[in-house]
Image: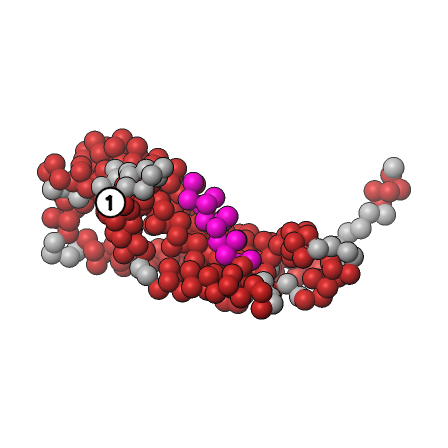
Amino acid sequence: MTHQVDTAWQPSPVQRERDAWRRRRTVRSAVLAAVSTVLVLGAVAVVVVSSPGWQRVQETYFDWDKAVDSFPAVLEGLWLNIRVMAICAVLIVALSLAIAVMRTIRGPVAFPLRLVGTAYVDVFRGLPLLLVIFLLGFGGPALSLEGLPTSALFWGCTALVLSYSAYVAEVFRAGIESVHPSQRLAGRSLGLSYGQTLRHVVLPQAWRRVLPPLMNDLVSLQKDSGLIAVLGVIDAIRAAQIETAIDFNYTPYVVAGALFCCLTIPMARLTDRYARKKGYHGAGGHL
């Protein structure tokens, strides 16, 4: 045992000097970053606080008592946003994946599928999301389609799914087409059918490559779920609007914004960390 301890590897003096130099560089970089951050934020705070209308803005937007009073209503509305985001995300993944597969099928027989998929993507990527919400939110219930709800919440979610699926389908298509053709040929040479090759060979690789941009789309969906408030659905934004209408104090909007940030910022950091772990950091432009 003593012999093993004596012969254990020890860094050389040169290696210890290099490690010490790296630690000094790390500490120096951290101190410089902290000082520059404090200076920038301090300068911004001085400019805002010293502005002529700061006192009025502080009373109107940063009233602590109003924030406490409106917090339960806004938080209850945010729970609706979270449920809308979760349900729509599942539907968007399923619909967009089907569209992406339709657009990547080769051969003249599959031309109608490619045409339908391309037309869908072109139309819903060309329409602003807010306009789609207005069209479906007010026009959908007027159709009185049998078997479909007439609630504004249902049609608002439908607009989110249709619009976001067009964008996410392009993300999936990029991932599918990034898989080298030799992978497909290898699958077919093993006796797999086209569908089996797609399911067992292509899609697993494509899914792994497009996961970071998909998480970015999920963050965007989380924020845009608040747009259904224009249909009268009482989500976090609509709840803040109702609380604001009581005394025209806009602090509930700040509360709603802070709650949305509490959801989106951790998810954004998780996305960045995953991208760096997979080696996508700084190379997101071609994904």
Question: In the structure shown, which secondary structural element does the residue marked by tag 1 occupy?
Answer: helix
Q: Residue at x 77, y 56 (%)?
A: 191
Q: Quadrant of residue 176?
A: bottom right
Residue 89 counted in the magenta span:
yes
Quick one: 228 or 109, which is closer to the camera? 109
Residue 130 counted in the magenta span:
no
Q: Is residue 223 left or right of residue 101?
A: left
Q: Is residue 20 left or right of residue 127?
A: right
Q: For the stretch drawn in magenta, what is the main secondary structure?
A: helix
Residue labelled with disc 1:
142
Q: Is residue 195 left or right of residue 102?
A: right
Kind of residue at badge 1: Ala
- In percent of width and height, residue 278 lies at 60, 56
Q: Residue at x 28, y 39 (%)?
A: 150
What's the colour scheme? secondary structure
Residue bounds of the magenta highlight: 87-101
Query: Can residue 134 be seen from the camera position used here?
Result: yes
